[in-house]
Amino acid sequence: MSTPVTHPFLQVEHLARVYPSPTGGEDVTVFDHVNFRIHKGEFVCVTGHSGCGKSTILNILAGLDKASAGNVFMDGREVSGPSLDRGVIFQSHALMPWLTVLENVSFAVKSRWPSWSKAQIRDHAMRYIELVGLRGAEHKKPSQLSGGMKQRVGIARAFSIEPKMLLMDEPFGALDALTRGVIQDELLKICAETQQTVFMITHDVDEAILLSDRIMLMSNGPHARIAEIVNNTLPRPRERSAIHKHAHYYPIRNHLVDFLVSRSKLFGAQRDAPDAPSSPTVFDPAELLEPEPVVTHTPPVGKPHIHLVNA
Amino acid sequence: MKTRLSLGQKSALLSLALFGVLLLVWQLATLPETTTVAAGVDPEYAALMGGGAASSASSFPTPAQMARTVWERLSDPFYDNGPNDKGIGIQLAYSIARVLAGFFLAAAVAIPLGFVIGNSRVVYQALDPYVQLLKPISPLAWMPLALYTIKDASASSIFVIFICSLWPMLINTAHGVANVRRDWLDVSRTLEVNPLRKAFRVILPAAAPTILTGMRISMGIAWLVIVAAEMLVGGTGIGYFVWNEWNNLSITNVLFAIIMIGVVGMALDSVFGVLSKRVAYQE
């Protein structure tokens, strides 16, 4: 996957989140020195164990939460609050139950383009409802929809405002495996069509491999960081039924699973060591990635680019 | 042959049966006392108790007498023969008008104020002691104060209705607004929805069921209180009617008024029942 060598679209610098200790002791640092960049059109997944602060990072990117330290820049401008430039898909879909599918999407469209006529808003909303395959269900209330359909409405709503960036917090976490697969395929298709820049949190390794260009791995909290970034070298377009046949699939998958099972803890242990403050805080995964790849295993050709950033 | 009755049919039958039993007991209890002295009772005692007079002049009506009164009164509800003789429709209209005036004044204050309180923890905590202190006060306790300051009986009873309707609506609105799901607020924040649109399109519909429950409770209390208030201030209204008929010792009319109070109360409540269904949503 070739990423454009332009100025990064989204830049996150030394992001940290500190909570005051409830018992009055030392403050709890959930994560600190989180640095990463996302280029336009990139699909980036973040994974890590619960409590490492993934959702907090996403909320900070969305402008719904404030960082204790660090900055987020999008398109050269600092992110200081929620904006229509960043669409959010919530895990709980967050549809308004008193509105129909069409009204839910129209609500977003009207927020984005307040001067549009009723017909314009309706047409635009319908286009995205059709995109997620919900034509015919537009006059239903969310309570009449299945979990998968509700999340589709959430996707249609987020895409309908044509945001510069899409933030997804485990959007398919609450769905059954079958439905999840179907919606992932749809998302893949829509993202390919719209060239949408996406930041997505997932616990599902296969989902990350199917959807993303890069996968960021977070070490365990407290003091969680982005420990590794994995370049997903599987070629697009990707087919769920075929990707596992590609030579890179299992090395990537094993690497991710290894990280989640064992290495995520090691990073935490290292952080407790006395060298913690002296460890280089300015590491930019993106820069480390591009030049000579650090070869960790031996397969000669077609080796996926797996880069250990922090090791 | 076995016929299966639906749940509704069964309960309708049971209701009718209960009504029949009620009428029967009523009828038996109000039978004219033809026997003079029951056996085994001291005749002097019986005489003292009025049993010896063989009078059937009890003021308590039989079901048939009651039915006749109900029919007469309902067939001419709007006559007006001076201050002490008005049709039931006029009396009820006075009461309903007062209740509605007090209720909507209270809604106009309680719902916006509840919005503010529900949106701000500071205001919530600042006003909470006042609400807690004022809420348990019987609305009728305000009556002397109202009469002294307002100097108008009808306006005073409207004020009493206002005071008693205020608290349930205020508390429920604040509670409903404060508990709007974070997700919906987050959605409107990410969509940069302006505060006014957020209030009307997100918070209001989200809190509407809770607000309406508060309004329903308020209306119930208001209808309870208006009867007592009108008994105090007199002049017009169903409460005054009850008291006036008690002074006339017309138990039949008192009973009739009681039934009408129940009917109107039920009707007012069912209006809010319908409205509640309208704004209800299923998550």
Image (spheres, rainbow, N blue to C red):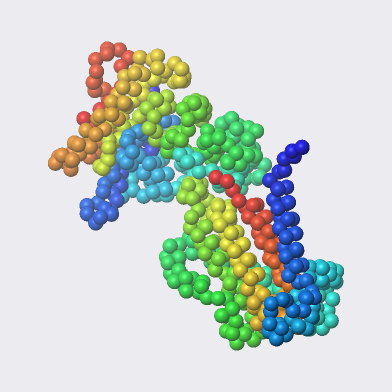
Identify the residue at horizontal 67%, vertical 75% (top origin). Answer: B227
State the image quarter where residue B1 is shown.
top right
A284 to the left or right of A46: left
Residue A59: which quarter of the image? top left
* Residue B73 found in image quarter: bottom right
| Residue at 77% from the left image edge and 79% from the top image edge | B36
In this rendering, the answer to whether B144 lies above or below B193 is below
Question: In screen coordinates, is B67 left or right of A254?
Answer: right
Give the percent coordinates (x, y) of residue A246: 38, 15
Quick check: can you spot residue A55? yes
Residue at 71 percent of width and 58 percent of height:
B18
Q: Measured from the top left, where is residue B131 in percent x and y?
A: 49, 71
Nearest the camera: A47 or B2? B2
User: Camera-side residue: A159 or B121?
Assistant: B121
Question: Residue A192 at x, y = what percent?
Answer: 49, 26
Q: Is residue B281 above or below residue B116?
A: above
In-front residue for pair B249/B182: B249
Residue drawn 30% across the image and 30% down it: A260
Answer above or below: position of A22 versus B79: above
> Is residue A33 among what the camera can see?
no
The answer to which of A299 and B105 lies nearer the viewer is B105
Q: Single out the residue that lies furthest toward the left.
A: A274
B174 sits left or right of B153 in the view: left
- Please give the count of numbered marks on the rendered protein: 0
Q: Quadrant of the C terminus of chain B?
A: top right
The extreme front residue here reads B40
Relative height, residue B76 to residue A151 (above, below)? below
Q: Residue A67: horizontal and vertical position, in percent? A: 33, 48
